[in-house]
Image (tube, rainbow, N blue to C red):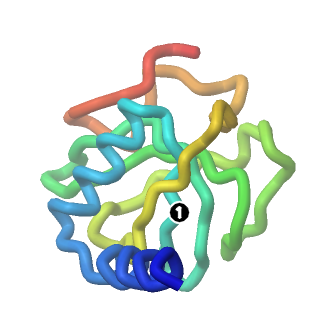
Amino acid sequence: MANAVMEVESTMAAAFRSIDEVYAVIRQAIIDREIVVASYRGHVREMCPHVIGKKNGRAQALLYQFAGGSSGGLKPDGSPSNWRCLRVDELSEVSIQASAGEWHTASNYSTVQTCVEEIDVKVAKL
């Protein structure tokens, strides 16, 4: 029962994070290569973040989505079509799921990308 209460409290805290807190969670997930679970435009998505920083003064992140919902549909894991360039201020209910070695990406990942102009943290070329 105590674990269930802690999980509910953790989920509630994730739902009410500030933009700076969301940014910090995604940033750390890049460093630790962990999975981010978040709601974006009405869909819960499971993603591996690769780059975070700013574009046109707004915080943005490049993430590889491998599970969950998407308005445009989701291709099989590993597909180059599953890259998402998302505004950090539009993410909600952000939490970390330990990846247990399951890092998801696509063969076309490159440190050269157009989602983020001012890079804070990025995954090195895989």
31 on left or right of 59: right
- Residue sitting at x 77%, y 60%: 74
Above/below status of 83 relative to 1? above
- Residue sitting at x 49%, y 68%: 38
* Residue 12 appears in the picture as rendered: yes
58 on left or right of 50: left
Above/below status of 82 relative to 16? above
Circle 1 is placed at which residue position?
A: 37
16 on left or right of 69: left
In which image quadrant can residue 87 be found?
bottom left
| Residue 47 percent across, percent down from the top left | 58, 52
55 on left or right of 77: left
Rendered-image quadrant of the C terminus = top right
* Residue 105 appears in the picture as rendered: no
Q: 89 or 57, which is in the foreground? A: 89
- Residue sitting at x 61%, y 59%: 46
| Residue 22 percent across, percent down from the top left | 28, 62
Above/below status of 124 relative to 80? above
Three-letter code, disc 1:
Val
